[in-house]
Amino acid sequence: MFNYLEYIRESNFPHIWCAGCGDGIILKALIRAIDKLGMSRDESVMVSGIGCSSRTPGYMDINTLHTTHGRALPFATGVKLANPDLKVIVITGDGDATAIGGNHFIHAARRNIDLTVLLYNNYIYGMTGGQCSPMTPVGSKASTAQHGNLEPSFNTSGLAIAAGASFVARTDVYHVQQCEKFISKALQKKGFSLVEIMTPCPTAYGRRNKMANPVTMMEWLKDNMVPVAKYDKMTDQEREGKVSAGILCDIDKAEFTAEYDKLIKKVRTE
Amino acid sequence: MTEEQSARKEPAVITVKPEWCKGCGICVAFCPKDVLEMEGGTAKVLRPDDCIKCMLCELRCPDFAITVE
Amino acid sequence: MENDSSGQIRMMQGNQACAEGALAAGCRFFAGYPITPSSEIAEHLSVALPKLGGKFIQMEDEIAAMGAIIGASLAGMKSLTATSGPGFSLKQENIGYAGMAEVPCVVINVMRGGPSTGMPTLPAQMDVQQARWGSHGDRGVIVLVADSAQESYEQTIRAFNLAEKYMTPVILLLDEIVGHTTEKVIIPERSEYEIIDRKKPDLPPDKYLPYRETEDLIPVLATFGTGYKYNVTGLCHNETGFPTNDPAIIGAQIKRLTDKIIIHKKDIIRNRMVMLEDAEIAIFAYGSVARSARSALAKCREAGIKAGLFQPTVLWPFPEDDIREVAGRVKGFVVPEMNMGQMAREVERACRRDTPVHRLNRVDGQPITPGEIVDLIKGVV
């Protein structure tokens, strides 16, 4: 048994997430990762935007900053740059990060600022009632795509890699041990690190896409998340409906706040 | 027998907090030993003696509602 | 650039004076996005801040810059952003967030003409109501205005002091003329001005409530990383900082956001009253227009017209009581402004229709000249 009570704000429970929503599974994986790394919660800040995922900080006993829609990364950039000794964790969703916050997402990755970003990808805007997001698969139904979504979705992890992130991994809440492992690796990485976590939304996505039962959505993750090494060898036809999981990028390079500290030293000795 | 193996032999104490459980059924569906069942909208522990302490129900419970000791 | 410049006389433009004033106030974080006519503030601080161990960052957009300064402020740094009309519009949601979450920070808006892209290089005073009402929702706001490089320096210091004291975003308005006019600035000695820092919690973390109702209605927010783990949100929240749906708590919270400015308005409002004692006609002018007004005033007095000047240095909270008091003594107000009458309406409201208010409006990007003001006064008298 893991004692989560030490890490949560118990008076705020039960949480607001629907039955079968995977967001609580991610929060637990994050708590275990933080515990095993022995991180100081006094010196850590959790920043989020708006949406179901972004309610995560309210449940965790840590410094928490629940910001405006899409803007978690700019707020987090300010926190981190003002005090680089703070560990900053950003919680965001597919709508928050890749639609309204898309510009901040690519620029935070480009800067390679030391933020650990957990992107909860549930293919939908859950909080507002199931509108399609830039991650909703083509053909899926949403309250604003009732005839089926026409728009191709982002490869969000690919986007982060192309923009300059140090660490990028994709996982899901069915493969919960892998999820914890990747979160732990991301927390330890110095630089912009992203873990894209596939998580079910039975209420807003599942209900419209023949997966209303939470178990059905977990089965979907079990059957369709494919290790990246295997995925890379698959044909386009075989990849249809599948999602690759694994560490997609792990490189060491100059981190923004460290470079800024070097700049300060340089200009002060000039 | 290693310490871990002997710990596994101890009967499991599985606790469900009904006021937090939202009855999603994930713990029941993915328990490899069918220890749990849904009853009246929440998870119930029916066969604790069969539990192998894989911990998956605790790990996958989104509601912080189930623990295995 | 370093604080050792105090006591010196220097030539600088208003934008640079804002940057220097910010450093003197203890600002160590700037996030911004390039926009005319405010970019010199960012450029100057990009050079100066790292030399003081501070941080400068050019963000990907205006919204991000506003978010970054709120984050930096919560991490303990006095933080600034600077912009102009279109950027000010973009920042509004996060300005409202800072108001709601009660995070101190300063936003400088060097006003240009609008709407839209408008007149990027020409002056206007068209954002004075946006500064008050630009973000959604109801709350009290503090908005300062500067008429010269000297006042830009001093008002930037004051903006930081008020932000830290009242735990709120403070807006400082310049217009393009003030921002870009290079003129003499006497850098005050450190002993000549006050520096206010936000209060620190005086209770241990287990007893600390960030938004506990205090007598002065101002919350005490701990700096992240100092052992006080609490929640900051833009949602309506209770004294712990957590979201609430309780109508009684929500009502009290939103009312307090207005009240905390209103009950302290005497401390916040400052006006310059010039020759108003015996005045028959009062000019209400602010920003660069106040300079033309002073010149017009001298010309009127030479011509034997008893004019006076009411120059607010704080636009919001609006100096309603002071206007009302002057209105009882004069035959009328003249309100020249580089907009369609945004503050004239406030003067009319304060006068309660007992005293006529004569407007003079220019919206063509050209300054209002002393001669135009004199002509209007002569017509009125």
Image (cartoon, grey):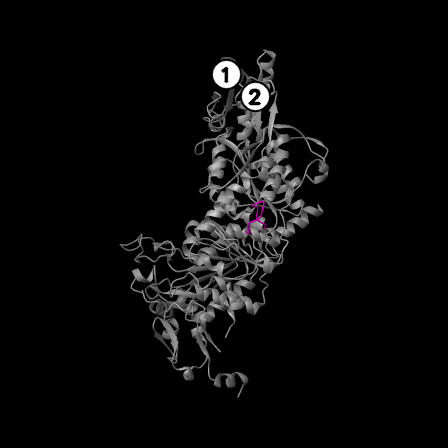
Determine the residue located farthest toward the top in the rendered image.
Answer: C303
Which mark is drawn over residue C314?
none
Q: Looking at this rendering, what residue extends furthest in the left direction?
A: A147
Whether residue B6 appears in magenta in the rendering, the answer is no
Range covered by the magenta-colored residues: C211-220
User: Residue A215 at x, y = what percent?
Assistant: 35, 69
Q: Residue C359, position in %: x, y?
A: 47, 21
Mark 1 closeness class: few <14, some 14–19, many ≥20 residues within 10 Å:
some
Q: Which three-letter amino acid code belongs to the residue tagged 2?
A: Ala
Tell me the quadrant of the picture where the N terminus of chain C can be found: top right
Where is mark 2, residue-wise? C293
- Dominant SS of magenta comes to loop
**Judging from the image, what secondary structure is the residue with disc 1 in?**
helix
From this view, report whether residue A118 is shown above or below residue C363.
below
* Residue type at the position of mark 1: Leu
Which residue corresponds to the image point at 50% horizontal and 16% vertical from the top-left?
Answer: C376
Horizontal and vertical percent for residue C189?
72, 35
Q: Relative to C347, is C27 above or below?
A: below
Name the foreground residue: C342 vs A101. Answer: C342
* On screen, residue C294 above or below A35: above
- Say whether residue C380 is visible: yes
Q: Earlier in the sequence, mark 2 or mark 1?
A: 2
Q: CA distance from mark 2 to mark 1?
A: 12 Å
Judge from the rendering whether residue C54 lies leftward or rightward of residue B21; answer left or right: right
Count the marks.
2
Badge 2 element? helix
Q: Chain of mark 2?
A: C
Of C5 and B24, nearer the camera is B24
- Return the residue at label 1: C376
